[in-house]
Amino acid sequence: MRGNGETTRSSETNSATRRRDFLRAVGGVGVATGAVGTVAARQGRDNFKLGVVTSLSGDLRFGGQVTRRGYELWKRTVNEQGGIQVGGSSHNVKLVYADAKSNPSTGADAASRMISQQNVDAVLGPYSSNVTLAVVPIMEKNRMPHITGSAESPQIWKQKPKYTFGTIPTVSIIADRATTDILNLEPKAKSVYITGVNEPFSKSTAQAMRKAAKNAGVEVLGFELFPRGTDYTNVVTQAKNAGPDFHFHGGHIGSHVSLVNAARQLDYNPNGFMFHYGVNTDSFKEGAGSKGAMYAFGATVWLPQVERTGGVLFDTPGDYVKAAEDAFGGTPDYTQAGSTAAGIVFGEAFKQLGASPPLNQQQKDELVSILEGIEVNTFYGTVNFETQGQYYHNNAKTKPLAIQLDQDGSPVIVGSEGGGQPTYPVPQWSER
């Protein structure tokens, strides 16, 4: 994988030419010019080096790869455009990866090793909230600046972490608003059945869905949380026996696919299925198949067709989509976009800091203070972090969107922020 190598310290007696050739050979990193860049090179490197802790294996690997693509696209684009400019010198970005293996304790151990062994300037965070919750104390202990481009559990921000920030609004905001929009579709649902995986993000999603349903006066026929890897035929059987108008589910992509496949197998036909994250991803569409994915409802905070401010690195959402498709061959979803935005924010904060890498601890603390006051216009929208209240250090103001996949698998905005025409009630499985 690109960026896994560690730049080796050269002898100070090497010529400038040999140093440049060596650095390019082992890491493709940029070489800073001027006195500041020379000092940094003598310290071992002249690139901004960020650690990435995410799930590259295990059952959360689909989402982990989404975050990886987002972070990688930021790095590639920055470096292609000449690096990060600090004090007249140009510094490329280097990413080093640690695999959380979809396990919180493994992620925490990986984060500790990365900080102690890799001498990173900052960290880009995990895909899932349960791993993030395990990693946050490591960042606090080591006073390491950390932005997650994915994790959405409100539990992260209730802790008021000094060193952790997040570009995607908490799920308690996204799921509540998107669910409310979907429950306002005609004919209005009178009952729902809610399921979720019993882990921080998924549990918070299911709870937000239940809150929205109760606020809308919709009867909750069942609320069930279960462990990852559960037998979804049992889940679907119970839900089918309850006979709800709508089925809501909080989970990750793999659990969505398992639920849809079990519903098709058992001919479970509510008027609609709503999932939160992952509906508009290739992994969901491929896993559920075209008939399983079509007409699924979901939530997002970013779509290519929604006009956003633009600015740093990518002028428009369309420019970002083209770059993502050229790099990885698929259309990006909001987690990939949020991950790229996390990198962009770090890049702008490095510029404001005005210090060449590697950063010392005082500079890292100053970087955190900069992040608390920063406002960056990006293709993803304006990013600025809350500095008080229950959403502390979360980018909470980005608007959620309720969506539905059409027959071709394309997302249609169906809530109050869109006005697209939903297919509702959805056709039964036998009619697709």
Image (spheres, rainbow, N blue to C red):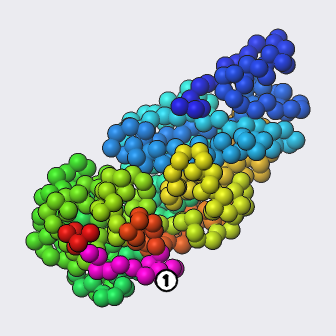
Q: Is residue 216 left or right of residue 149?
A: left
Q: In this view of the protein, can residue 294 be seen by the observer?
A: yes
Quarter in which the C terminus is drawn: bottom left
Toward the viewer: 422 or 224? 422
Callout 1 amino acid? Gly
214, 1: nearer the viewer: 1
Q: Residue at x 47, y 80 (%)?
A: 420
Q: Residue at x 52, y 43 (%)?
A: 68
- State the extent of the magenta-drawn residues as a range: 413-427
Position of residue 292 in the picture relative to residue 9 (left or right): left
Q: Is residue 115 magenta?
A: no
Looking at the picture, tell me which residue is in the foreground, 342 or 262.
262
**Does residue 118 appear left or right of residue 248 in this picture?**
right
In the displayed structure, 403 sits above or below 143; it is below
Q: Main secondary structure of the magenta part?
A: loop
SS of the residue under disc 1: loop
Left or right of 320, for residue 53: left
Q: Residues within 10 Å of mark 1 (few under 14, many from 20)?
A: few
Q: Quadrant of residue 355?
A: top right
Q: Circle 1 is placed at which residue position? A: 419
Q: Is residue 421 magenta?
A: yes
Q: Position of residue 222 (x, y in %)?
A: 18, 72
Quadrant of residue 8 within the rendered picture: top right
**Position of residue 302 measured from the top left corner of the image (x, y, whole percent):** 54, 65
Q: Can you see residue 198?
A: no
